[in-house]
Image (cartoon, rainbow, N blue to C red):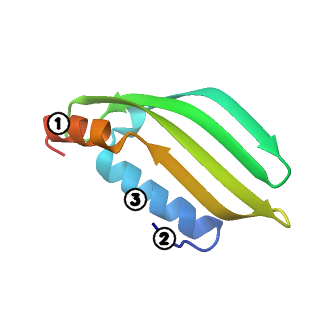
Amino acid sequence: MNSLSHGREEVRGNLERVFSLLYDRDSVRTTVHHQISQGPIGAVRWSMTGSFATGGTFANEYSLWVEVQDGLVVRVWEYTDVAHSTGQMRAAQC
């Protein structure tokens, strides 16, 4: 899936918009379980818990990989259990 965002401010703005619509920001907690890097590639596996903006709770694990060139992120791969997330969203009527 391709979704392009250019520049830090555009990425930050997109993330803030999505998070504020979906989650109760004050309830969100993250725990980093692993972080690794090798050359231009880095990865992190973390879990996130909290409440949806509409009520109801969520918990899921995520994996994020990035490729860096000349100090800039040029590629991102994100993985999560979408079926698990969808079930929680439906239960919370998101």
- Vertical position of residue 93 compared to residue 16: above or below: above
The amino acid type, in three-letter code, at marker 3 is: Arg
Q: Do the residues labelled 3 and 1 touch (CB within 8 Å)?
A: no
| Quarter holding residue 49 | top left
Q: Judging from the image, what secondary structure is the residue with disc 1 in?
A: loop
| Quarter holding residue 84 | top left
Q: Earlier in the sequence, mark 1 or mark 2?
A: 2
Q: Earlier in the sequence, mark 2 or mark 3?
A: 2
Point out residue 87 in the picture as x, y percentages from the top left corner. 21, 37
Horizontal side of 67 relative to 49 (left or right) equals: right
Q: Mark 3 points at which residue?
A: 17
Q: Judging from the image, what secondary structure is the residue with disc 3 in?
A: helix
Of tags 2 and 3, the one toward the viewer is 2
Of tags 3 and 1, the one toward the viewer is 1
Query: Whole-Å distance between the Cαs marked 1 and 2?
Result: 28 Å
Of tags 1 and 2, the one toward the viewer is 2
The amino acid type, in three-letter code, at marker 2 is: Asn
| Quarter holding residue 85 | top left
Q: Name the residue under label 2.
A: 2
Query: Whole-Å distance between the Cαs marked 2 and 3?
Result: 19 Å
The amino acid type, in three-letter code, at marker 1 is: Ala
Point out residue 33 in the picture as x, y percentages from the top left corner. 61, 25
Q: Name the residue under label 1.
A: 92
Q: Judging from the image, what secondary structure is the residue with disc 2 in?
A: loop
Query: Whole-Å distance between the Cαs marked 3 and 1?
Result: 19 Å
